[in-house]
Image: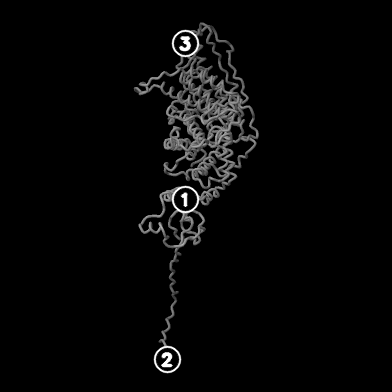
Amino acid sequence: MNHVSFQPQQPPLAPTNQQPEIVSKPRKLRRISRACDFCHKRSIRCKPSTEDEARCQNCLDFGVACTYNRPAKKRGIKSGSAKAASENGTSSRDGESDARMLLELTHGVQGNGTFNVVNGFSIRERLKSMKLTETKIQNLVDVYLEVVYPIFPLFHIPSLRRRLASKDYLTDHSFFADIMAICTLASARARDGALLPGQWEPDHFRQPPPEELFAVVKEVMPHELGSMRGLDWMRTCALMALFGIQVGKIEIMHQYLGIYHSLVAMNSLHDEKNWPKNVGIVETELRRRLFWSMYTLEVYSSIIWGSMVRCREAQCHVSIPSEIDDEFFSDAGYRPPNALLISSTAASNTMCWLHGWNFAVELYRILEHAIDDFHCRRQTNGSSPSELFNREVPHQTVVLNKVMSMYEQLPRQFKEASINPMNGQGGLEDKFSFQAANITATLQLVRMILFTSEKANPEEKCAIARDLLDSFAKIPVEFLRALSSPLLHHLAGIGAILGSVIDNPISEPSYIQVRNVLLRMADLLSQLEQGMSHLGPASRLRSQIENIDAFMAAQRQIDQTQSRSHPMFEALGPAPVAPMTIKIEPNPNIDPSLQDAIDGFQTPAYDYSSSMGVGSGSMAPGMGTQAPDGEFMRVPQEIIQDWPFPMDISSGFATSAPGPGPY
């Protein structure tokens, strides 16, 4: 008989108006039994995410896909050496594997080329977020090769194009920095209108802006200089220094020039005998080009901005680059297009554009010593150790004659542009034209520095400036504009030396010469500044000339009134009814809004051989011209204090103009 057990019935609960309390338990996170590919590759803990169940927290933070594509391995201790090593408490990885893992953790360098991460972000994802396509990268590289490479040939074009085609920048950390630096500089040049006509639409390069590309370069660069070994990192710093000049942020230029010089010391770039023994022909030539390119930039910046020369020619042991085009050499050897034998050392080849490039380097080597001589002539407090090493310095005239003799021996293609760059493709003719423009500007700067060391008079300085302007008149303005911001700063240096004569007592005829040359320079600057919002010395220069004109006109009226009461003029009889005047001829290039003021500027003609006597009167300080008392005028400091070019050559010429925006 079956017994059924009954439980006592519980009394019903009393009714209540309160809702039963619902206790929410925290969601239990799933335990990850297997690390994802991203965490496994970096040997970091794969933590579950509270926001997205499909991805781990690390993949969510870094914005990458959380995948499990690698094949699963069997669990357990492997037999053999791995087991023995595990039992002894040691790792089964050798030193090479440990170094590879450390490199991946710190810099994201990958060996399989399938998924590259740099400093926490995926290269592919970063390029996608900037909308920087493979085609856009190629276009920006082409812009660099057209308008920057002829002056800064930091790459071997066949090798560069081959690495671009294979997309090495996706797997090579340093080469990715190189390419981003190229794109940054090329984008800034394109925004400033430094494009050869007929090939590119400027709007094509508006996105991404150079500031965004610059941020990527900063993001990708290691924090430890010891990790930046090799040619690519030095080139990246060189390109970033040029970018600083381009956007008028001189502090950026100084920052990356400083990093570059640190890397030069670490890599012994300044001494060929300390280069790696396995360096091939291509890298040897590129190292020479990089070194001398940055040497010219160092001397240039020391003159324009008054900084020190940290790369002295006497302490360097690097040959100049071979004068042969990129397509005619590789690591397999040199293949000149003619019977001329070219070795790994530099050979003279006047048919190659690098012959003109090497000549410009030689001018900068002369400039370095000319600047040294200028600073040695300045008065200093106390004695200098340089007095113990008193070497005989040749007279500036001797140096100048040698420089001009070297220039006369140059082939014609390095003195003027022979074609108009319509539909330019960055070809050989364009490279010759770039050399002609660069040599012209550098040659006149050498002459100005040498004459300034000898305290030349305004007439001599005006003659040099006129030669510069006449030479530039023969070069299509497209090439000058393609040289962009560095050329404007270069002209600012020449304008500073020429304009410095206004800071001293100056005669009115001398001022007329200086004034005409400065107006021509303002015209040239206006042409080159088109599309560049962060530089504008041309308008400021014209404004200052107008202010000085007003002062000179008022001073002339005072002098004429005072001169008629002088006893000497009373003996000469009454003043002529219509004094002789010097008429300034209209300049078709001058802004029409200023032409009326120029036409009305009438200047008394002073005859130094008149009855007042040649040689009578006073000599103005630093001037090579004698004139009667009172004929020299000094422009007040309050008028010239806003002069667009600084007057003091010893502290540099150019100033750091405000850039287009913050960084």
The quarter of the picture where residue 164 lies is top right
* Badge 1 or badge 2: first in the primary sequence: 2
Q: Residue furthest bottom?
A: 1
Q: Position of residue 436 (x, y in %)?
A: 58, 27
Inter-mark Cα distance, 2 to 3: 146 Å
Inter-mark Cα distance, 1 to 2: 73 Å
* Badge 1 or badge 3: first in the primary sequence: 1
Q: Which residue is mark 3?
A: 617
Q: Residue furthest left?
A: 382
Question: Callout 1, which amino acid?
Answer: Gly
Residue drawn at 44 percent across, 66 percent down: 28
The quarter of the picture where residue 381 lies is top left
Q: Which residue is mark 1?
A: 120
The residue nearer to you, when weighing 27 against 340, is 340
The residue nearer to you, when weighing 638 against 189, is 189
The residue nearer to you, when weighing 565 against 120, is 120
Q: Residues within 10 Å of mark 3 (few under 14, many from 20)?
A: some
Secondary structure state at the residue bearing disc 2: loop
Give the number of the disc on residue 3: 2
Residue drawn at 55 percent across, 15 percent down: 604
Give the number of the disc on residue 105: none
